[in-house]
Amino acid sequence: MPDSVPLPDEVALLWGRREAPRRGPKATLTIDEIVRAAVGVADADGLAAVSMAKVAAELGRSTMALYRHVRSKDELLMLMGDAAVATPPDLSGADWRTGLTTWALSIVETLREHSWFTQLPLSGPPVGPNNLAWFESALRALTDTPLAELEKVGVVQNLITLVHGEVRLGRELQRSFDEDPAKFGRYGEVLAELIDPVRFPALSRVVSSGAFSEPEMINQDLAEDFRFGLSLFLDGVEAYMQRRAG
Amino acid sequence: MPDSVPLPDEVALLWGRREAPRRGPKATLTIDEIVRAAVGVADADGLAAVSMAKVAAELGRSTMALYRHVRSKDELLMLMGDAAVATPPDLSGADWRTGLTTWALSIVETLREHSWFTQLPLSGPPVGPNNLAWFESALRALTDTPLAELEKVGVVQNLITLVHGEVRLGRELQRSFDEDPAKFGRYGEVLAELIDPVRFPALSRVVSSGAFSEPEMINQDLAEDFRFGLSLFLDGVEAYMQRRAG
DNA sequence: ACGAAACTGCGTAGCTGATACGCTGACTAG
DNA sequence: CTAGTCAGCGTATCAGCTACGCAGTTTCGT
C-alpha cells in the first residue's frame, strides 16, 4: 500500500523515515547525535545557548556540517522537542484520576530536566512519536469514562497547559533567583512599598498575610500550587463526569 | 517617610519613578513613546521583529538613542509586558465565579491582541502596575470566599496559566496555519497514517471519531477547549470551597 | 572497471542584531 | 559666563544564522 498521503518532510524526519541516499560518502554524523548534543547544550546552558556553532563544536565538527542533516535551526529545535520527552509511564490498571495525576507529575518531572521545552516554538499540533505517545498515554487513562472523544482531548489539552505553566514558571523563577537571590527576599517588602492598600486591598491582604515572605521555598511553593491546581482541575472533571453520567 | 527599601531599578522604571536629571538637554524621546512603538512593532510583525533598530526607525531615531532610556533590550521587553495589559475590568457586584470567568475571558481577549505577551522572558513575580492591577482584580473576586489567602493566590496562579496556554496555543496554531494552510487540512490524515491502532488505540479512536477533521475551525475549537477547561477548573474550585465550608 | 552522478564536510562570506565607547553640542546651576 | 551634565548618535565589535560552492568520496550503470 503506497502512502496515499506523503508525509510532510519534517514529520518524516521526526519519525526517522527520511530515506538515506544511496550514493556518495556515508554520513559520519547522525541526526541522533546532533539532537543529543543540542539537548545536552540546552540542559546545561539553556535554550539560548543552543547555537549551531556550539552544537557543532560539541561534536567536534564545523557549523555548516549540521546543515547536511537539518534543514534549519528550527528543524533542530523541533527534533529536540520530541527527544526531550522520551517515553511516558505505563498507567494501566489505575483509575482515570490516579492515572492522570501520575501522568501529570511524570511529565512535570521529565520536563523539569529539559525545562527549555516550553520555550520551543510550536510548529502546530503534536506530530512527533514521543509527544504522541504521551498524548496517547493520557487519553488512555480516560478510556473508560463517559467523556466524548472531543472532551477527552479538551481535558488533556488543558492538563498539558497546566503542566507547561508549572514548568515555565519554575524555570523562570529559578533563573531569576539565580541571577539575584537578594531580590527574592525583598519581593514582599517591595510589594508592600508599591501597593496602596486603598487601590489594592485584596493584594494588600495577601501581602500582610505573609504569603510572599518565605523567599527560600520558591519551588516548593510552586510545586504546591501545581498540585493544588491539578487537584482542583481533576475535581472539576470528576464533577463533570458525574453530571454527565447521572 | 523615606523609602526603607529602595526600589530595584527596573521596578522604579516600571512605575515611572525614575527621577529625571536636572541638567543637560531635555530628552526629546520618552520611554512611553519607545514602549508604544515597540508594542506596535510586536503587534504588527511579532516579537521576533522587535529589534532596537526597528523600534528606533519607527520613531525616526537612531538605534543607540534608545539606550539612553532603556538599559537593555530585556528592560524594554519588561516594559512592553506591563504596557500590553492596560486596565482590568471592574468586577464588583459579581459573585466569585462570574467574576473570575469575566476576568479570564477579558485577559484572553486583551492578550489576543498582544499575543507575543506569552513569549516575553519572565523576570520574576509580577511587579508592574498593570500586571498587579490584574492580579488584584482576580483576588478581589475571591474576597468573600472561604479560601485562605495563599489558596487564593494558588487559584489565580493556575487561572493565569490556563489563560497563557490558550493565548500561546492560539498564536502558534494561527502562525502555523498562516505558514501553510494545507498542512492543517491534512493533520487528521497524517495522524491516521502515522498511528498504529495497536500501539495508539486511544489516539486512533479520537482520530476516527473525526475530532481532527475540521481544519477550518482551529481557533473556534481552541476557544471551546479553553471555556471547557475554565469551567472544569472553576467547578473544582467550587467543590473545594464547599468541602472547606461544610 | 571506469566515468558520471550523488553526496558529505566544511571554508568563506553576507546579513541581521545587540550593544560598548566616545564625540558633539545643548542646557543649566551657580 | 562657564563648568558640569546629559541627549543623540556614528562607529565598531561580536555573535549567530545560513547561502554558496569547492574538494574529496562513494556508488551506480554500463
Image (cartoon, coloured by chain):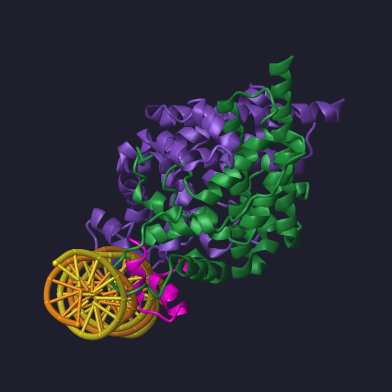
Chain colours: A green, B purple, C orange, D yellow
- Residue A26 appears in view: yes
x%, y% of residue A175?
59, 64
Residue numbers of the magenta segment:
A48-72
Q: Is residue D11 above or below residue B35?
A: below
x%, y% of residue B54?
27, 57
> Which quadrant of the rendered structure holds the C terminus of chain A?
top right
Horizontally, is C30 left or right of C11 in the view?
A: right
Quadrant in the rendering for residue A71: bottom left
Horizontally, is D17 left or right of B77 in the view?
A: left
Residue lying farthest right? B246
Assess whether residue A63 is covered by the magenta stretch. Answer: yes
> Which quadrant of the rendered structure holds the N terminus of chain A?
top left
Q: Secondary structure of the magenta portion, mostly?
A: helix
Horizontally, is B191 left or right of A23 in the view?
A: right
x%, y% of residue B171?
42, 41
Total numbered circles: 0
At 60% from the left edge and 47% from the top edge, which residue is drawn? A165
At 41% from the left edge and 27% from the top edge, which residue is drawn? B214
* In front of the other: A92 or A154: A92
* In front of the other: B110 or C26: B110
Horizontally, is B15 left or right of A232 in the view?
A: left
* In front of the other: B155 or B177: B177
Quadrant in the rendering for residue B69: bottom left
- Residue B135 appears in view: no
Assess whether residue A121 is covered by the magenta stretch. Answer: no
x%, y% of residue A40?
54, 70
